[in-house]
Amino acid sequence: MNFDKDLGPLGPLLGIWEGEKGTDLAPSDKPENNRQLATSKYRERMVFEATGRVDNHEQQLFGLRYSTKAWRIGAPDPFHEELGYWMWDAASELVIRCFMPPRGLTVLAGGTAKADARAFSLRAEAGSEVFGICSSPFLTAEFKTTLYTLEVQLLDDNTLHYDAHTWLKMKGRDELFDHRDENTLKRVTSAP
């Protein structure tokens, strides 16, 4: 496949992806059991649309407008959504991802990659002015996200795998909780 070279390692993401192999490892939804691990299998749909060129004075970015929805297998309503952007800065070989789930949380994660990379890692940390995490008062008090990491792999032109870890400082718990989401998706179409 020919990918938009201006998008660097993000070019192969352009299009619509779907997968039913997701695994969500999260705290239980029941407050009295939130110390317990809940495992959910899920299906997901991701959409990546080109934004075109974005100029920040001398910096030139190319990116993707991004959305995803995830449904527990067999459930009619999504349990998770995200909206955001993935950006490529070719001059500094930097991948930037900013997203917001509708829970009172924003994440700006980044990492370096070569233009032709088929795998890359992103990271954001609470309190950082560069690649940070910002949460609402409730989430900060009850489920503060302290660290977010993401591994992305394009296994071939039509198979995308990711492994995300959201490290939570939960009220009443000394140790951090590793909320993990992992899925493998297939390209449905190369243009949304």
Image (cartoon, grey):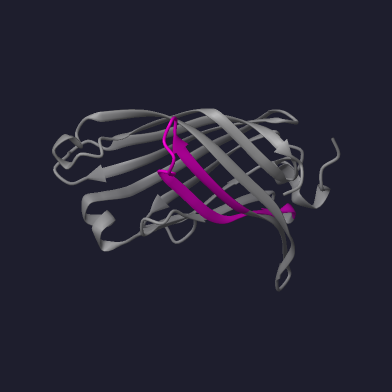
Q: In this view, does 12 lie above or below 144?
A: above
Regarding residue 87, the answer to whether it shows in the image is yes
- Give the main secondary structure, helix, strand or loop, of the magenta stretch: strand
Q: In which quarter of the image is residue 19?
A: top right
Name the one closer to the observer, 166 or 93.
166
Q: What stretch is highlighted in magenta?
A: 66-90
Name the one closer to the observer, 102 or 100.
102
Q: In this view, does 122 lie above or below 50?
A: above
The residue depicted at 43 percent of the width and 31 percent of the height is 74
Q: Where is residue 116 in the image (x, y as percent from the top left)?
A: 76, 38
The residue depicted at 70 percent of the width and 36 percent of the height is 188
Left or right placement of residue 142 versus residue 15 in this view: left
Q: In which quarter of the image is residue 58?
A: bottom right
Q: Is residue 69 magenta?
A: yes
Left or right placement of residue 178 versus residue 10 in this view: left
The residue depicted at 70 percent of the width and 33 percent of the height is 118
Q: Position of residue 167 (x, y in %)?
A: 35, 40
